[in-house]
Image (tube, rainbow, N blue to C red):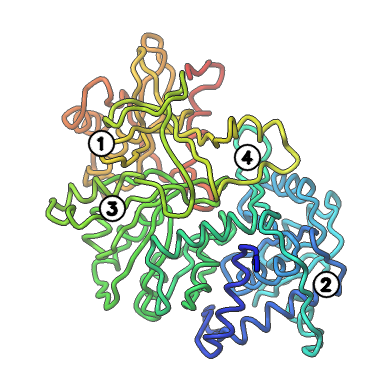
């Protein structure tokens, strides 16, 4: 009577019960669940005919299109492992991943053809499948995707390999910073349990229309690729982040749900058209990827009437392990107080397992006083099986049955966890711990600041001190001293940044995470960081 836990079964259910429901909208193209199911089955058969077997690895380098969605289901239902690629990585990282992952085939968007062509001599790929893009000629030799699946005889049955719920479903690579990217092995079970959390805690229902603003390659779209199918909802694809287009799609398709990093939220609230938008749907947005400032959440709720939901996790945890649960008692609080609560990472989700904050010296759980600092650790249903072909890094991350996140946090009396900083981002100035995210939270309240990143820079007297790197609102005129004085008037003086640098933009990953290491590199060359 045992049935393995796998999110692939949700496609079967959706095709069975919602065959004529619109499953996917991709620009002018629409597919019902019956049509979507047939396309994924054809992909599976075509790959099988091309020699892809259970356990083989297939890399995919596609933006948020219906092809990417089809790959998650078509590849994985063969019992093969999908390797989603971050198409914004440097060529050396892509070459490393494609070799390290043991990918046998690559499905690639024509837009990225030149990049792959330049790497082909270094790659072990046997089969190339290219998704055509209008106005973009492919620079690599490979089978056209539509021809590839079009050759399949519909009378042929889809292979039905036995699925092990603890077997690998996807191999997701983390972005390398000071070392090579690490391959995170996520199983059928961990994907299923994370998607169950997505369904339950983000209140996903059958009538939801979900906009894929979050890259699907990033932790499998946080589970949205599975969860919306499970509910029979509609996936709306988005090739690139384009704030005016996103606002247009909100109205055109009556979007009800989306996900994105705080940077994406910031882009939307600062888009001039946002103030003209008159939404007729109750629009929900989950944010994660970096601690969001309370001021940013407040602006999103005020300007776009977005019901902001804060979740927290890592690729290594599929990714959700905390969410900021909203309680009715919070509704009597002021808008600023509500935003402050929503900025906390929150409590365990229903299906992920146990998460807590522990003292870094003795490993015991910190006091629930909102003051004692420790590291977030977790164990349970969503933690990775390990890093692919890297037992040393796996042993460093998973100790005594707990995964160590590298995030420093406190726990409040109600059990809500709040990140203070990444261990590597914590500023230790004159022996005092200073949270860069706390400073950023204050600065985001300044009306002239569009974006900000706070980092540690060397200081002869204190070892290191905070520095704020700021992107101003268009047309804003404010001085370095104005910003310093504003911060000092809103927090303890020793925490305030000692210097401000104004820039045009901040370095970010494809998912909108700030890359603080790139900012730090500018100031720490030849100097030794304190922590």
Checking the image for residue 48, the label placed there is: 2
Real-space Cα distance between discs 2 and 4?
32 Å
Q: Characterize the local packing of mark 3: few (<14), some (14-19) or many (20 or more) Cα atoms within 10 angstroms.
A: many
First in residue order: circle 4 vs circle 3 = 4
> Residue 166, image x and y in percent?
67, 54
Q: Which of marks 2 and 3 is in front?
A: 2
Identify residue for label 1. Answer: 413
Q: Which of 167 and 25 is in front in this view?
A: 167
Horizontal arrangement in the rendering, residue 333 relative to residue 516 (left or right)? left
Residue, x 22% and y 31% (percent of image)?
487
How far separated are the C-alphas under marks 1 and 2?
54 Å
**Is the residue under label 3 in contact with that under label 2 (CB below 8 Å)?**
no
Q: In which quarter of the image is residue 385?
A: top right
Neighbours of disc 4 within 10 Å: few (<14), some (14-19), many (20+): few
Residue at 79% from the left image edge and 55% from the top image edge: 103
What is the CA distance from the residue labelled 4 to the residue labelled 3? 29 Å
Precedes in sequence: disc 1 or disc 2: 2
Q: Residue at x 75, y 68 (%)?
A: 78
Q: Nearer the viewer, residue 195 or 293?
A: 195
Vertical relation: 349 (above or below) 137: above
Q: Which residue lies furthest to the top in this view?
A: 461
What is the quadrant of residue 218 in the picture?
Answer: bottom right
Residue bearing mark 4: 176
Q: Do the residues labelled 4 and 3 touch (CB within 8 Å)?
A: no
On the picture, is 423 further left or further right than 334? right
Compare residues 61 and 477 and report the one nearer the observer.
61
> In the image, what residue occupies the spot 51% across and 57% down?
194
Q: Is residue 400 above or below residue 245?
A: above
* CB under 8 Å between discs 2 and 4: no
Q: Which residue is the site of mark 3?
A: 297
| Residue 101, x across and y down, in percent | 76, 49
* Position of residue 327 measured from the top left corner of the image (x, y, whole percent): 23, 55
């Amino acid at each position: 009577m045992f049935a393995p836990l796998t999110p692939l079964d949700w496609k079967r259910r959706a095709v069975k019960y919602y065959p004529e429901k619109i499953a996917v909208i991709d620009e002018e193209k629409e597919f019902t669940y019956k049509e979507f199911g047939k396309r994924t089955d054809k992909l599976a058969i075509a790959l099988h005919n091309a020699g892809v077997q259970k356990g083989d690895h297939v890399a995919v380098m596609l933006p948020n299109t219906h092809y990417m969605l089809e790959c998650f289901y078509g590849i994985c239902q063969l019992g093969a492992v999908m390797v989603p690629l971050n198409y914004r990585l440097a060529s050396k990282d892509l070459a490393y991943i494609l070799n390290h992952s043991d990918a046998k085939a690559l499905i690639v968007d024509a837009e990225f053809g030149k990049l792959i062509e330049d790497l082909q001599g270094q790659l072990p790929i046997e089969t190339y499948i290219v998704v055509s893009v209008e106005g973009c000629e492919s620079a690599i030799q490979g089978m056209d995707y539509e021809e590839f699946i079009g050759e399949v005889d519909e009378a042929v049955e889809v292979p039905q390999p036995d699925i092990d719920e603890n077997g690998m479903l996807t191999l997701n690579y983390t972005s390398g910073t000071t070392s090579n990217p690490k391959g995170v092995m996520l199983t059928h079970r961990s994907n299923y349990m994370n998607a169950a959390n997505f369904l339950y805690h983000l209140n996903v229902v059958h009538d939801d229309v979900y906009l894929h603003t979050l890259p699907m390659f990033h932790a499998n779209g946080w589970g949205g690729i599975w969860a919306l199918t499970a509910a029979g909802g509609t996936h709306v694809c988005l090739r690139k982040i384009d704030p005016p287009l996103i606002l247009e799609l909100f109205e055109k398709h009556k979007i009800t749900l989306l996900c994105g990093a705080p940077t994406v939220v910031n882009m939307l609230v600062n888009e001039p058209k946002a103030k003209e938008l008159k939404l007729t749907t109750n629009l929900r947005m989950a944010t994660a990827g970096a601690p969001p400032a309370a001021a940013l959440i407040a602006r999103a709720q005020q300007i776009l009437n977005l019901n902001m939901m804060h979740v927290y996790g890592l690729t290594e945890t599929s990714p959700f392990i905390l969410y900021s649960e909203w309680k009715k008692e919070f509704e009597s609080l002021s808008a600023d107080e509500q935003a402050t609560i929503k900025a906390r990472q929150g409590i365990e989700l229903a299906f992920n397992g146990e998460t807590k904050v522990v003292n870094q010296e003795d490993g015991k759980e910190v006091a629930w006083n909102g003051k004692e600092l420790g590291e977030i650790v977790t164990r349970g249903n969503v933690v990775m099986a390990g890093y692919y072909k890297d037992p040393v890094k796996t042993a460093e991350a998973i100790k005594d049955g707990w995964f160590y996140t590298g995030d420093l946090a406190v726990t409040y009396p109600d059990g809500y966890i709040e990140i203070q900083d990444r261990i590597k981002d914590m500023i230790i100035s004159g022996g005092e711990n200073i949270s860069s995210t706390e400073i950023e939270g204050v600065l985001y309240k300044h009306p002239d600041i569009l974006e900000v990143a706070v980092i540690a820079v060397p200081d002869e007297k204190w070892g290191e001190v905070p520095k704020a790197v700021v992107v101003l609102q268009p047309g804003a005129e404010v001085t370095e001293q104005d910003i310093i004085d504003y911060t000092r008037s809103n927090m303890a003086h020793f925490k305030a940044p000692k210097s401000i640098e104004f820039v045009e933009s901040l370095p970010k990953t494809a998912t909108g995470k700030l890359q603080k290491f790139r900012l730090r590199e500018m100031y720490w060359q030849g100097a030794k960081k304190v922590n």
